[in-house]
Amino acid sequence: MVLGIETSCDETAAAVIKNGTEIVSNVVASQIESHKRFGGVVPEIASRHHVEQMTIVLEEALNQAGITYSELDAIAVTEGPGLVGALLIGVNAAKAVAFAHNIPLVGVHHIAGHIYANRLTAEMKFPALSLVVSGGHTELVLLEEHGSFKVIGETRDDAAGEAYDKVARTLNLPYPGGPHIDRLAHEGSPVIPLPRAWLEGSYDFSFSGLKSAVINTLHNAEQRGEKINPADLAASFQESVIDVLVSKTVKAAQEYNVKQVLLAGGVAANKGLRNALTEAFASMPERELIIPPLYLCTDNAAMIGAAGSVLFEQGKRSNLALNGNPGLDLQQM
Ligand code: KG4
Ligand code: ZN
């Protein structure tokens, strides 16, 4: 029984995971309503909400699981990356519980958590390739075995989710903009030509040029007194993002001859991306595509418990000097 704790951004979350694969309880307190009026996450407000919610969420996770702290084998907590003030709340809660009840503590990388949301969905097979697309990260990660993460490509500027949120803001859509663009995209057609940064010869990504192109398209139309259909712009933007993400994932999956492709991160909730990946891998039965349900794609603690279970079994332990680390490296875990 592993207790997972996650507070890296704007969700205060706790979950209990059994045997690394079974969700016994899963509690998420979202702060989105508090940050919406600022158009993004305000770090100081996030920290304060985590302080208010942390003990309530922890108690609820144990209550739902019907267990007490003494029945836990380990506590897994997001150590980084994320907002430092936010991370500190989860890390200190985890340390307090670990110390008070003498339970082993395991620090977990947030992205390892997103990837391990897949283990709550299906049995993992190696080598596996994970496409990680979140608000802060866009990466292709190769897993040769449990707990081993090799980043073979990453964004050189904006993360995919960040580009979604910025484009959404330009279109006057509420924060977080990803789901709104996704919905709008399905109401329009991809008729507006937008660039794709292929970065040939590498598995890296770049989305800032695309983001600027969307903003310029809108501004130029405004200056000419023309009106652009926001649904068409959303559809064109989404097509450009998905085109690059899917092409690079397919290429890497073939080059590394992986048995599984694991979708991970908040942008994994994107319907267009889910459909395009499903279509692309439909003709490759030798590479199984796993897509976690929506509630495991956005930030949660079940995924941290799942990743923590594996690290715990592999003997990883953190001590009470554990600190929030905004720059934590996935490959140094
Ligand atoms: O993984 P996550 O919950 O937090 C981070 O670790 O960053 O990801 C949040 C990101 C936000 O940028 C949000 O706009 C995006 O995921 N997102 C989506 C969708 N749902 C959430 N982006 C595109 N389409 C969606 N349906
Ligand atoms: Zn996340």
Image (cartoon, rainbow, N blue to C red):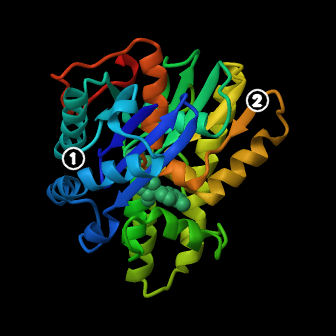
Give the number of marks: 2
**CB within 8 Å, label 1 to label 2:** no
Mark 2 = which residue? 287
Q: Name the residue rendered at 59%, 73% in the picture.
A: 232
Tell me where residue 45 appears, x and y as whole percent.
17, 60
Instruction: Name the image quarter holding the C terminus.
Output: top left
Q: Earlier in the sequence, mark 1 or mark 2?
A: 1
- Mark 2 near ligand 1 (CB under 8 Å)? no
Q: CA distance from mark 1 to mark 2?
A: 37 Å
Which quadrant would residue 169 be assigned to in this image?
bottom left
**Can the viewer see residue 182?**
yes
**At numbered mark 2, what does the secondary structure look like: helix, strand or loop?**
loop
Residue in front for this viewpoint, 316 or 330: 316
Tell me where residue 156 appears, x and y as whole percent.
39, 36
- Mark 1 near ligand 1 (CB under 8 Å)? no
Amino acid type at image mark 1:
Ala
Q: Is residue 195 left or right of residue 54?
A: right
> Residue 86 — which label?
1
Q: Name the residue rendered at 29%, 46% in the picture.
A: 7
**Can the viewer see residue 154?**
no
**At numbered mark 1, what does the secondary structure look like: helix, strand or loop?**
helix
Q: Is residue 162 left or right of residue 129?
A: left
Tell me where residue 109 appears, x and y as whole percent.
36, 30
Q: Name the residue rendered at 58%, 71% in the picture.
A: 183
Q: Measured along the vertical axis of the image, is residue 152 above or below residue 167?
A: above
Which quadrant would residue 224 be assigned to in this image?
bottom left
Disc 1: CA contacts within 10 A as few (<14), some (14-19) or many (>=20): many
Amino acid type at image mark 2:
Arg
